[in-house]
Every structure is written in structure tokens, then in C-alpha cells.
Amino acid sequence: MDFAETEEQRLIRDSVSQLADDYDREYWKTCIDEKRFPEEYWDDLARDGWLGVTIPEEYGGAGLGMLEMAMVIEELTRGGGQSGIIFVLTPVFGGISVERHGSAEQKERILPAIADGEMRFCMGLTEAGAGTNTLQIDTTGEKEGDEYVISGQKMWISGVENADEMLLVARTSEYDPTNPTHGMSLFLVPEPADQDAITLTPLEVEVPWFETQYQVDIDGLRVHEDRILGGEDGGLYLLWDCLNTERIAGAASGVGGGLRAIDLAVEYANDRSVFGQPIGGHQAIQHPLAEAYADLLSAREVTYKAAWKWDEGEDAGLEANVAKLQASEAATYAADRAIQTHGGSGFSADYEVFDIWQNSRLLQTVPVTNEMVKNYLGEHELGLPRSY
């Protein structure tokens, strides 16, 4: 296994970096303040083929791998954009899940539309009463003829207002403690914000995103059986397959955001002079930034390894979880040190580093808490007793 970048991957980095440079902080601040989807940015991602980076060529994509997607996300986030949200919701939840588990009709309908930027996804999984314990979700889908009638409530759902499809998780068979992973199904719900059976309640959060978080109440939603992804009652295994790529994408976003924080801190430390020299010449400033940079490079390596193993068809669960853990903590530390480098200015709205810290800190909690990642490592890798 050699992570020396190919010429194609270097070109990907350069091209993506140039695209990100076209969208400065004011652009993103406007989208965040107005809760406006970054249409122009999205259109450019589609135009240059980045939304379809892992979609097979026969469906209009680039036919590349998760490794290349991780590089794209990293470079876009390092450029200041919120690509982590965009890529997790649509190219991952939409593109990868449908490409790997969809029917021929679903692939023909969805994959070209994602690659062209014509379709956006959201994910309906989290519930207040279940949290990380997905097996205990209360949303149910009962079969009536050739339809399922779905009812339940989802929490902290991003991007519903912009989604053309929702990948919705519901229980289609009663929970059986002797076979706990059985009974989950994944549904492709069209135009979720326009469904009469769906009510959206905005949730206030402090993290600076362009998208709104919602409580999603579902009461008697009818979905045709041909909109099940992969088959009835087998959705949990499909979901786990998808969640590994979510963790890789989140890790890549964390690495990119952390590197941006370092870039901004270095720029400020070179420009700001105190006691007769640039503050970057003082070890109290320089060493923490160097340490943070080293941590980010280590997180990047395990992220790439996770993506490479996934592309090779190997079990990437260990690496995906470690990448998520390491990247979220390294990014938060880097942003913290960037704030400290800026001194009082680090808390000013005129500078970006506090926003980066908020986004990086969130990664320690989503898409899965770091505590649950450590539980996984302790039990499945170290052979310790189950701790929860």
C-alpha cells in the first residue's frame, strides 16, 4: 500500500483548490447568514465533475474511488467551503448507497442526476429516543398492498428543505432481541419537504451552517415498495456500509478544516509583530501550531488508508472509525491553537478561526460520538468487555 499521490490525484487537488479559491469567506458568510444553499458553488462542483467523483462512468460520473473523494473534500474544506455537509448528504448518502445497493431503475434515475447536480439528498436516521442506539428507533413502516405507511419522528435532520430525496430509515418488522439487526428498511422518499404527511420544525443550533436542522414528524407517509433500497428488513447492513463512508468523508472534512485553521494562523503569526518580531518567531506560538499540523498529517494518513481499503473492497471499519476520532480531535486542537494565535482577534467576527473551531468541535459528536468510537475500538479491536 503506497500513498504516494498519482499525477491524476495531484491534478484533482490543484483543480479543486482553484475552485475553492473562487468562493471567499464573504460568500460563505452570506449563505450562512441567509440560510441559503450555495447554488453557485454546487453548480461549479457539478460542472467540474466533483459531485460524481465516485459514480461509475456509465451513469455520468468520474468512476473514481473514495480516496479521491476524500481528497476532494479535504481540499474544498481547506479552501473555506462547507463541502463536508454537501458531500455526506448527496454523493455519500445518495450516490454511494444507491450505486452499491440500488435497483437498476433506481441507479438510472438517481446517479446521473447526482453527477449533474440536479438531485440533492438528506438522511432521516436519528431519533430523540434512540440516539446512537439505532436498533431502538420507533419510526415504523407497515405494508399495505404495494405501499408502506410510515410514521415516526426524526431529529437533527440536515438539509430537508433542499432535498429532492430523503434516505429514510424505518423499522418494517418488530424488534427481535434474538436477531436484533433484522427488521430495518431504507426508503427513498421523494421531495420530503413537500409531503403532506411530513411536518418540519426548525431547530436552533449555534454551529455556523447554511442548512437548517429539523425535527421531522412523519404521520402516515405512503411510499411505494419500489422505493425500498436493497430490500425489506435488510437495511441495517446497507446502512452500516454507508456509514463507513460517512465517517471517512467527515474525517476528510476535519482534516481540511484543521489545515485551514493552521494556514490562517500561520498567515496571522507572520504578519502580526509584537516585541519587535513576528509572533510566529516565538516558540509559544510556533510549537503548538507545529504539533497541531503533525496531528493533522497523521489523521490524514489513516483517513486515506480507510478510503483505500474501502476502494479495495476490504473491511475499513477500524480505519474509518480511527480516522473519524483522530481527525475530529486534531481539527479541534488546530482550531483552538489558531484562536490562541490570534489572541483577542480570534473571537472577532472579522476572523474565521472561531467558526472553524465550532465546526471542528461538532465532529467530535457527529456522525457518531467519539465515545462510541472508543467503545468500538475497545470491544472489537482490543477484546475488552462490552461497555454499554
Image (cartoon, grey):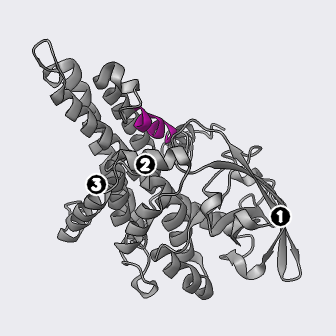
Between discs 2 and 3, the one toward the N terminus: 3
Q: Nearer the viewer, residue 222 or 101?
A: 222
For the magenta stretch, what is the residue range? Answer: 354-363
* Residue 361, magenta (yes or no): yes
Q: Is residue 148 left or right of residue 273?
A: right
Real-space Cα separation, disc 3 to disc 1, in angstroms: 42 Å
Question: Which residue in the structure is indicated by mark 3?
Answer: 21
Mark earlier in primary sequence (1, 2): 2
Question: Label 3: how many residues lie within 10 Å, few (<14), some (14-19) or many (20+)?
Answer: some
User: Where's the N terminus, which quadrant?
Assistant: bottom left
Secondary structure of the residue carrying numbered label 2: helix
Q: Position of residue 100 (x, y in %)?
A: 53, 75
Check if residue 57 falls in the magenta segment. Answer: no
- 65 lies above or below 217: below
In the rendered image, which quarter is residue 124 located in? bottom right
On residue 270, which mark appears? none
Kind of residue indicated by mark 3: Asp
Residue at 61% across, 87% down: 105
Mark 1 sits on what residue?
197
Q: Is residue 236 left or right of residue 142?
A: left
State the image quarter where residue 42 is shown.
bottom left
Q: Decide: is 104 above or below 201.
A: below
